Amino acid sequence: MFEKIYDYSVNEIKRGYAEDEEGFVCLCCQQRFSKDEIYLLDNHFYKANKAVIVHLKQAHSDYFDLLLEHTSHGCTERQIEILKAMKQGYKDNEIARLTGVAAATIRHQRFILKEKARQAKSYLAVAESVFDPDENDPYVKIHEGARMVDERYCVTEDEEAKAMASLFLSLKPLKLKQWPAKDKKKIIALRKICECFERNHEYTEKEVNAILKNIFDDIASLRRALIEYGFMARSEDCSKYWRT
């Protein structure tokens, strides 16, 4: 899910689909809709430009929530909760009641979130003026579910290769030597471990444990870290886990 989200423009991410010469693509699942075809959805025929919109509503009706939960944006859990309530049209007093905080706190958070958007827009303009989109990037790509991105994620491909050699006893099968103390090495280890889980597939906790058990003895630490660092997500009742 959202495997290539950062390859698209802000407007494309906002609406949930993108257009190219051949057709339209859903940003959630990468399903394509060719301009040369007609699609039957809900007993109605649609051209590609309409079909992708209907698909989004049917298959990803919670697109806004998914975008908040599975992409890197630097918002705290409380801010995510407030943004969801705002999206649903709740007023500050109603959000305060739902979240159990003072209305003044919600107003302050609304200001902070708007300022965050203003700063992001300004930085985007600066970054696009400085960085060449075609230049080779020596840094390892940050995973989509990363939270609070900072220097811990600043790892070159060479650094990652050296760390992998010291972190793992073997890569096939994957065997972790020891759980690292430093966050940067934890992230490198978790990035490799999460590859053991398929995308767009839900796992029970028992299934997650069975996979992690083959990698390292401390299953609980691995499972907790995969969630904490955003490599995996889980349902509120912890019955389902999935790779972000």
Image (cartoon, grey):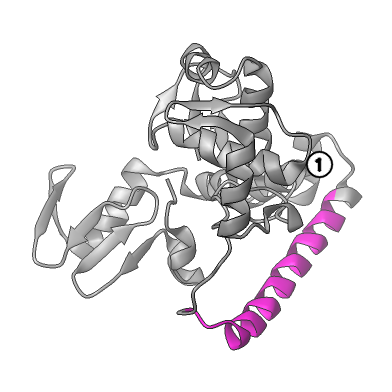
Magenta stretch?
106-133
Closest to the observer, 220 or 242: 220
Residue wearing tag 1 = 96
Q: Residues within 10 Å of mark 1 (few under 14, many from 20)?
A: some
Horizontal arrangement in the rendering, residue 73 relative to residue 215 (left or right): right
Q: Position of residue 203 (x, y in %)?
A: 44, 22
Disc 1 is placed on an element classified as helix
Identity of the residue drawn at 87% across and 47% down? 103
Identity of the residue drawn at 83% across and 34% down? 100
Which of the 4 quarters of the picture holds residue 47?
A: bottom left
The three-letter amino acid code for the residue at tag 1 is Ala
Q: Position of residue 195 (x, y in %)?
A: 46, 37
Residue 93 visible in this rendered orientation of the protein? yes
Identity of the residue drawn at 56% across and 33% down? 233
Q: Is residue 123 magenta?
A: yes
Identify the main secondary structure in magenta: helix
Closest to the observer, 5 or 193: 193
Which of the 4 quarters of the picture holds residue 153?
A: bottom right
